[in-house]
Image: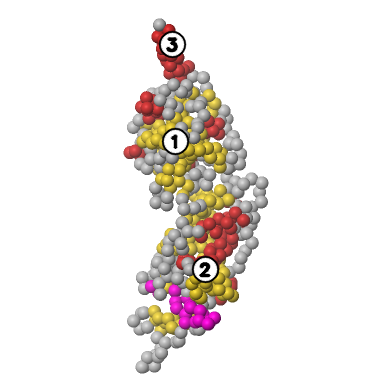
Amino acid sequence: MKCLFKPLIIIVSIAVPVLSVAEVYRWVDDKGVTHFGDKPPAKTKSGASPSAVAKVNLRGDKIFNQVKQKTPLKYQAKDKAALVLFKELQVKLKKSNRKDLHIGTRTQSNRGSCGNPQPIMWDQGFIDVSESSLMSDVIVAFKEENYRMITGKLMSVSNSSRLTLNATISKLRIDVCNSYNQGTSSYQKAAAYVKVSWRLVDRLSRKVLHNNITEGAVNEFDRFRRNGAEKAIFRAITMAARNLLADENFVDHLTPLPGQNVPAQTFARLDVALRYGNAKSTFKSEIEKLKSVAVTVRTVNGHGSGVILDKAGYVLTNAHVVGESSDVIVLINNQALPGKVIRREPYRDVALIEVKNLPAVKSVAISKAKLTEGDTIYVIGTPLDESLSNTVTKGVFSAFRKHDGLIYYQTDAAINPGNSGGPVFDDKGELIAISVAGVFTRDGASLNVNYLVPIEDAIKKLNITEARDMSHLFDVSDDIEKSKVEGKNKTK
């Protein structure tokens, strides 16, 4: 009998089966076909028995009862634990073209007795169940021990979740005794066992920090329960998660990350010729100049975006764009120039690159105005591929968001992988933020829920201070002279 797994619901809806007091035998005939039966196979005319006859343990008592719940190590530090993104949950069992991978049994209750067992056969191979409620059960297990974890049907690229956790169910046993159905609910006795492989990854460095395998099991054949099979599997996976939290080597990685829970890393003061705008222009009239200060940042692992802060060659981007690289390539107006990463602040997710021999560019103006929900904003960056550099998207400022003590701007402007670190302008053409995160479906499609790092906060976290540079005053002087002339014309 096939086990029908629905990827978004999970193993539980398996029309599964389970235990029986009757005995079940498994054997292979002379043609290599696997059989199951409640009686041993009959001998052939020659008196020989089929090969590989074995009695099947229906209840799985041994495997269900040997797995013990360990005591999780509760997080007790003063600072918050590092935030973990539970990124992926998969069921990856042995692929079986012969459809003989036996993962359990099912029976039907008859006058209180679970008899006539039928095998549950697995022939699905691999299934991704990352959008199932199973992930929520694991999150609850983490939060009960004061650890912080997020997930959901969406994937966030937010730097606030620098650690990612992946889980793969590599072994499964499920025994079910069906009683009756009532509406959309079924009542079952059930026992479940899982073996789960866990992998913790640092998204910034892309290093695997910890690998582990834990087990979980529950035997609930004492009485019929509503959706008993589903609950048994959920509880077994949750037990495996708790056993993971009992591993000291694993929880050591959940302490606050460098730079977390502190205002900023310690940097020496850096004077940069920043220029602040006067809100007298428009994005449309300044678009060519603004595109000239938006750059592509290329690393060994891909690319992101950035913005030139001044003509001396300082480029602002995200820390997760440069990763741990010291050297990057900055693409400016179709020129590939070497850049050196001189500062990075992972918690705020900002970094500063220095580029020597920068080609002539006009300075970007930083906005002094305060944003209001509904204000129009513009994003410039290099989404998806380097060939799409200087892509402009438009949206509104949706809301102020606060997460882990950091302020973010939310926008519906289209932001995709590759936009990270790119400049965001108001309708006056003045810099207000850099892109940092987007929320996508598991297929990678943007849902237009995107986040930005306010420019003033990025500057502050890198300890950049405004330097006097007379050459940057010419643009402002031109505006002043223009306004004087317009004033004289009005008086005439």
- Mark linked to residue 59: none
What is the three-letter code of the residue carrying label 1? Val
**Which residue is label 3 attached to?**
487
- Mark linked to residue 396: 1
**Which residue is label 2 attached to?**
227
Circle 2 SS class: loop
Count of numbered tags: 3
Q: Nearer the viewer, residue 303 or 449?
A: 449
In terms of image quadrants, where is residue 247?
bottom right
What is the three-letter code of the residue carrying label 2? Asn
x and y, in percent, of residue 158 in the image: 49, 44
Say few, some or many: other residues with alpha carbon within 10 Å of mark 3 (under 14 / 14 to 19 / 20 or more).
Answer: few
Sequence-wise, the earlier of marks 2 and 3 is 2
Determine the residue positioned at 62% across, 63% down.
Answer: 70
Say few, some or many: other residues with alpha carbon within 10 Å of mark 1 (under 14 / 14 to 19 / 20 or more).
Answer: some
The span picked out in magenta is 99-120
Residue 106 highlighted magenta (yes or no): yes
